Structure formats: structure tokens, C-alpha cells
Amino acid sequence: MAEFKNNWTRQEIEEIFYTPILELIYKAATVHRQYNDPQEVQVCTLLSVKTGGCPEDCSYCPQAARYHTDVKVHKLLPTNEVLEAAQRAKESGSTRFCMGAAWREVRDNSDFEKIIDMVQGVSRMGMEVCCTLGMLSASQAEKLKEAGLYAYNHNLDTSEEYYDQVITTRTYKNRLDTIDHVRSAKISVCSGGIIGLGETENDRIEMLQTLSNLPEHPESVPVNALVPVEGTPLENQGKVSVWEMIRMIATARILMPKAMVRLSAGRVRMSLEEQALCFMAGANSIFAGDKLLTTPNPEENQDKKMFQVLNLKPRKAYKEQEISQ
Ligand code: SF4
């Protein structure tokens, strides 16, 4: 059986990460089959409920107010509009609905009350409801849990060492504290990163070490490839190769055997064959819908075709709970 632990050493991770690629895919596919149904892929929809105007300086993000991008800023959407979008996502096969707001942190104000209403509404639809709202206090995490929040996304983005090259308006410790609050409130943790920010392979390995050595592995680990956006400091970054994505996905799969490893941003630039290799390497979750917050994503029809060709089936909502009962 695959090893289940959270004391991975740097050397152990390096050995996995630098395994020749076809051998690495084989190893990851083997681990994947021990804990997951390899035909099953979770389909999530991500909606930006508040877009742009963010005070943070994440250098990859078109929603930061300080960069001049084409993002159309909008305030928090009305609750009924969000619930209608969730209903449409459900009808087209998504089992997880994630709401993202471009905030530095959650404030205890009327917008947070509206988010609570949205969480309650989506939860009543029988979908797994997830939010990504920035930093969260312990009491806010508990309030969200009470409202029915199933998961919270808070990515580490990169290694601790490289973090201040990407973001200067908050610290790595801030990130880890929010993850801790989410975990303490018994909300499922979704945390991963982005490659292609100019980091080294060492940074990628270090980030995977931090994630896999958290007291409990995150239940979801999104692996994103940077989609450079004009107007952001990283607009000229080169394209991440599919092999780099596969290496990250496969290593994450081996280190965190039960996590949902999500093939996230950058999928729009991949062929069906390249995505198939990512699934082979242990990815078992995707975002559906033609937009990922503000960047493009494959269209619904293309994904339907991919599921048919690869014989994949969407994972049911709340399956983790069924397994643990
Ligand atoms: S990634 Fe999030 S926190 Fe950073 S600038 Fe964009 S919206 Fe703000």
C-alpha cells in the first residue's frame, strides 16, 4: 500500500519528484488506484461572486486593484443570482460549487452575512459548497461551518522561501493560520499552488512538502499552471509544459494518496491527450465552466466529450462522508 504519512523528508520527496516521468506516472497511477476509483473525476464549478478591486498584490492576479487589466470590477453579486448559477452548475453535472471573492480577508459585515445566505442556499441544493474569500478568523470559519460550508480554498501558491517574490501584502504564516482555522472548524481543506511563477523546482518541492506535512493532508489539492494576464507583473512568463504539470500532479498524488488532486488553471491550454495523461498521473478533479474566476477554461461541451472519450464519470457529492461513515 502507498505510504500515508505527514513527515515526508526533502530527500524522499526529491526522489519521487525526479523519478523518470513515465515511471513516475506509473507509480502515481498505482497509488491512485489503491485509494480512488480511477474513472471517477470530481466536477466543480467556480463562480466569482465579487470581482476585482482587491487590495492585495498577488503578482499573477488580474483582480488586484493596483494592476491595469481588463477585469470588470463588480461588487458582491445578489444572492438570487448566485443561487441561480449554482442551480445551473448542478444541472450541468457539477457536484461542488465554489464561490470566490476578491477580498484580502473576510470582514464581519453585511457582505459576510450575504455569503452566509449563499452558503446556506447552495448547501440546501445538495451540492458541496466551497468558498475562497481570503483570510478567515477562527470565529468566521465556525460561522461558515454552521451555515453548511463543506470546503474552503486557500492556496499556498508557492514555497515559503519564494512567497515574498510573488506576494508582499501578506505572509506565508497568514496563509497557514487561515488553513488552521478552517481545519479546526472541521471544514474540508482545499489548498494547492501555482507553477510557472518564476519559481525553481526546489520551490515546487518545498510547497509539496509543506502541504503533505500539514497535520492532516488537505482533502483537495489544486495544481494550477499560470495563465499570464496582460497588465500583471507576470504577464510575460512562459508557458508551463504539460510534463511540469504531470510531475507536480503525480508527486502530489503519491504524497497525499487520498486527496482530490485538481487539474485547475491552465487546462484550457491542454489538449485532450495531455489532460488524459494528467488523469493517468492521479488528477481526479477539474473545474467546469468557461471561466475560472476571470481566466478562460474549456467549454462545457469539450469536457462532456472528454468524459465520453476517456470513459470518465463524475464523482457524487459528499462521497468522502459516505466513505468515512
Ligand atoms: S489572488 Fe486573491 S488575494 Fe490575491 S490579488 Fe487576486 S483576488 Fe486578491
Image: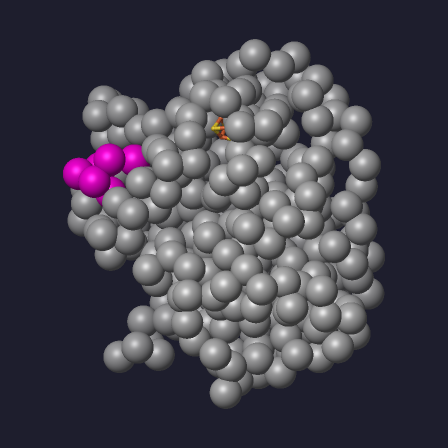
Considering depth in this image, is 223 or 268 the residue closer to the camera?
Answer: 223
Q: Main secondary structure of the magenta part?
A: helix
In the displayed image of the protein, which residue is found farthest to the bottom? 1
Say which residue appears at 48% left-offset and 65% top-offset.
8
In the rendered image, which quarter contains the C terminus?
Answer: bottom left
Say which residue appears at 31% left-offset and 29% top-offset.
106
Image side of residue 237 versus residue 56, left or right: right
Considering depth in this image, is 299 or 320 the residue closer to the camera?
Answer: 320
Image side of residue 147 versus residue 249, left or right: left
The percent coordinates of residue 158 (x first, y second) are 56, 42
Say which residue appears at 77% left-offset and 46% top-offset.
240
Say which residue appears at 54% left-offset and 55% top-offset.
208
The percent coordinates of residue 163 (x first, y second) are 53, 34
The percent coordinates of residue 91 (x first, y second) are 51, 57
Q: Confirm whether residue 42 shows in the render.
A: no
Q: Which residues are magenta?
A: 136-141
**Residue 51 sits above or below residue 123 on the image:** above
Image side of residue 290 versus residue 20, left or right: left
Image side of residue 127 versus residue 27, left or right: left
**Residue 302 sits above or below residue 196 on the image:** below
**Residue 291 sits above or below residue 55 on the image:** below
**Residue 269 sits above or below residue 162 on the image:** below
Q: Is residue 191 magenta?
A: no
